[in-house]
């Protein structure tokens, strides 16, 4: 079987888009008007799980893992296994550890897509989640050189607003 190289910037870009979508969803002022935002929370968790998966796969693709290797059943959607592989390749942060641990079990078992009434779903503090994503984004971006390849420097953040307003992250450019 021929192994297809995976451009690390592709899963990285999608991961970042998922985080921006999750951020917009959770910081939108109209969210407060909902009497029950359970459906938003499930969508939020699904986006976050996929974002973690794609950030870690972007790093592993940068380290030479092929698309086929990353899709194999023993890796697939297993965030804890992906975290182990990233650590063995030299990538580690407490943010990565937190995110893989937070979303790993239900993401691997597809439970954010196929809600099970008997399952308890814990909701972590969103400020902590976005802080961890900021850390992971910076770490992976720096490792694979995604921003650098576009003449930018890594460093954007998803700071959950304390004033009720919402803003997308800013990216600084050289010059």
Image (cartoon, helix red, strand yellow):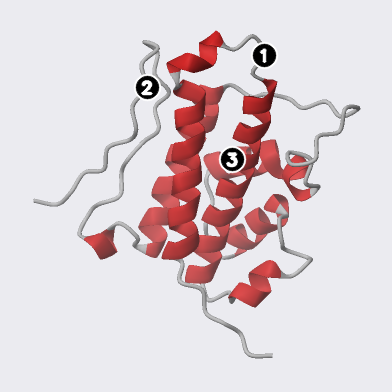
Q: Distance between the Cα atoms at labels 2 and 3?
A: 18 Å
**Horizontal and vertical percent position of residue 5:** 52, 79
Looking at the image, tell me whether mark 2 or mark 3 is earlier in sequence order. 3
- Kindly state the secondary structure of the residue where label 3 is placed: helix
Say which quarter of the image contains residue 167: top left
Looking at the image, tell me whether mark 1 or mark 3 is earlier in sequence order. 1
Looking at the image, tell me whether mark 1 or mark 2 is earlier in sequence order. 1
**Horizontal and vertical percent position of residue 150:** 24, 61
Say few, some or many: other residues with alpha carbon within 10 Å of mark 1 (under 14 / 14 to 19 / 20 or more).
few
Please identify the residue farthest to the bottom as the structure is shown.
1
Q: Which residue is mark 2?
A: 166
Front position in the image: 151 or 45: 45
Q: Which residue is mark 3?
A: 48
Q: Which residue is mark 1?
A: 36
At 65% from the left and 68% from the top, the residue drawn is 70
Q: Is residue 148 left or right of residue 74?
A: left
Q: Distance between the Cα atoms at labels 1 and 3?
A: 20 Å
Q: Is residue 33 left or right of residue 170?
A: right
Q: Are marks 2 and 3 in contact (CB under 8 Å)?
A: no
């Amino acid at each position: 079987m021929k192994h297809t190289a995976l451009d690390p910037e592709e899963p990285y870009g999608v991961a970042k888009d998922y985080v921006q979508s999750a951020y917009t969803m959770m910081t939108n002022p109209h969210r407060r008007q909902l009497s029950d935002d359970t459906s938003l929370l499930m969508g939020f968790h699904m986006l976050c799980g996929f974002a973690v998966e794609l950030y870690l796969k972007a790093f592993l693709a940068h380290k030479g893992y092929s698309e086929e290797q990353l899709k194999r059943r023993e890796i697939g959607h297993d965030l804890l296994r992906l975290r182990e592989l990233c650590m063995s390749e030299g990538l580690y942060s407490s943010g990565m550890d937190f995110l893989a641990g937070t979303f790993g079990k239900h993401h691997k078992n597809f439970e954010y897509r196929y809600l099970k009434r008997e399952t308890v779903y814990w909701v972590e503090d969103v400020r902590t989640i976005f802080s961890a994503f900021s850390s992971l984004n910076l770490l992976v971006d720096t490792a694979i050189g995604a921003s650098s390849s576009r003449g930018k420097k890594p460093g954007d953040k998803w700071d959950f607003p304390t004033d009720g307003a919402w803003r997308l992250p800013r990216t600084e450019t050289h010059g």
